[in-house]
Every structure is written in C-alpha cells, then in structure tokens.
Amino acid sequence: MAQQGRGVAAACLVLAMALWGSSFIALKLAFQEVAPHWVIFVRMALGSLIFLAAWRWRGRLDYRPGDWKYLIGLAACEPCLYFIFEALALQHTSASQAGMITALLPLLVAVGAYALLHERITRSTLFGFLLAVAGAIWLSLAGESDNHAPQPLLGNFYEFLAMLCATGYTLLLKHLSSRYSPFFLTAMQAFIGSLFFLPLAWATSPLPASVSPLGIAAMIYLGTVVTVGAYGLYNFGVSRLPASQATGYINLIPVFTLVFAWGFLGERLTGMQVLAAGLVFAGVALSQWRSTAPTPAGVLD
C-alpha cells in the first residue's frame, strides 16, 4: 500500500513537471502581448476563483502558534518573488534555457533539506541528481542561439534567483504539508499572489488596448491548468515524499520545456539535445532508486 502511494505521488510529480514545462511557452506567448505583472495577476486571480468555487474540499487545517510566519514566507518565496524573477528571466532568455536552469533546484533543495529538515541524502540520490544536472548542462551547451534570447546570461541569472526562491518555498512546503492540505496551501498561494501582483501591475504597466485570442488562451491556461493543476499535484507529491526526492523530478522540466518549445515556438531540438534529455531522465530515475522512507518533517523551528 505504501509503495502504491509512492507510485501515485511520483505520477503526480511527473504530470506537474509536464505542466510546468508547458508554462514557459504559455508565459512567452502571453508576454508578447501583455505586461508580465498583469499576466501573473490574471493567472493568480483565475486560480483564486477556482479555489473559492471548490472551497468545501479544502482539506485539513491544523494551525499551530507561529505557523503564520511560515505561511507568509511560503507565499513570499512563491508566487511573489519567484514570479518577479521568472518574468524578468523570460524577457531576456529563451523558454528552453530558462527551463534548463530549473535543473539546479534539486541540488539546492537537497542541501537545504539535509541542513534544515534532517533528510538523509543517499548515494544513489546524490549521483542521480548530479547525472541529471549534467544532462541539463549538456542540453544548454547543445542549444543554438535564437532571437528568443536577447540577453541569455542575464535572463539565466534571473532564473537562478527564481530557483533560490523555489528552494525556500519547497522547504517551507515540506514543513507545513503535515498540517495543511495541498489544496489549502495552493489556494493560499493564489490568493496572496493576486493581492500582491494587482497593485504591482497597476503601478508599473498599463493595461493592453487589446489581446489576441491566443494571448487570452495562454493566460487562461496558466491560471487554471498550471496554477491549480501543477501546484496542486506538486504539493501533493511533496507531502508524500521527502523534499530532496520530490524535487528530483524538477529535472524533467527542461526536457518537457524543450519538447513544447519545439512544438509551439519553433525552437529546434537537435540530436545532441535528445541524447541529453535521455540523460536527464536517467538521472531522475536513479535518484529514486531504492530510496529510504521519508523522515518526519517539522524541524525548522
């Protein structure tokens, strides 16, 4: 039964990675017509409406004194700071390269989980992470420059800052997931994100005069399928697996991003990139091989 539960969690994480991989393409399309902060606000607002409609299924809420600082920290890391840096990244680099930078997240989380959550890092997990990161770097080196990346180094640096925010988010999520349902934590992100990005968008960017059906569809997709679906699936997976293992699946994002970018943005997938993608998949599989049971969360205090 426990093994079956781990299988469900793994399937949810793979699907979440596919949705997140597609989000880079949807963001690129939306940013072509609408200012980034407005895109993020619409995304968060749509997600909030869906969570409000389904609030009766919010799940467990076991508030304990002091949890407020972790809940606020969770939302500050992601969506607030994370999406600011990701919006900046996608204005300067390609969707493919931004997706590749996400491969650094598992290593950042593994170190943080070891230091703060006392999660043990097995040799197979560590070697799998290193193999997947090597594959992601190979993907980047094998990529060809294009007009989607006017300042790739700057854009990739912004994406790295986004990964630091995602690291804090994942560790806080693991700390809180034993007391709060994935639904509640995802809904809280959407609500706070809406309140944060509305005044920011209003103060920094004018509303567009018109938006094409493709731009509207991209924002609806981001607000419904990605914000609700991907975060909900990821939060569920993290609640069932150790944080250091769950984030191993992040290495699948560059692969999914490359495939979607090739299909929707015309970015080419070279033979070398196909081989590198296979290395990423092999690294993720190895990082999950013969894993030990998760240690209890809740030692951030």
Image (cartoon, rainbow, N blue to C red):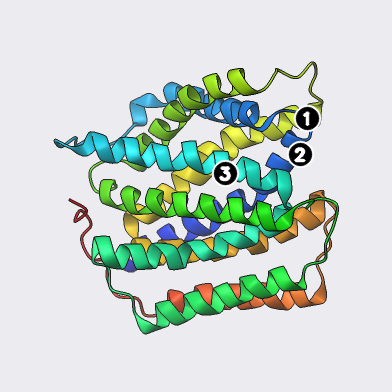
- Residue 185 spot, x, y in % from top left: 36, 38
Find residue 29 and name its label.
2
Residue at image position (47%, 26%) is 196
**Residue at which label 1 appears:** 33
Alpha-carbon span between mark 1 and mark 2: 7 Å
Mark 2 burial class by Cα count in 10 Å: few <14, some 14-19, many 20+: some
Q: Is residue 33 left or right of residue 183?
A: right
- Give above or below for 157 relative to 255: above
Asked if the residue at tag 2 contacts the one at tag 1, i.e. Cβ–Cβ closer than 8 Å, the answer is yes
Q: Which residue is mark 3?
A: 85
Mark whose residue sits in front, 1 or 3:
3
Residue 7: quadrant of the picture: bottom left
Q: Amino acid at mark 1?
A: Glu
Question: Disc 3 marks which amino acid?
Answer: Phe
* Local secondary structure at mark 2: helix
Point out residue 250 in the picture as x, y percentages from the top left corner: 52, 61
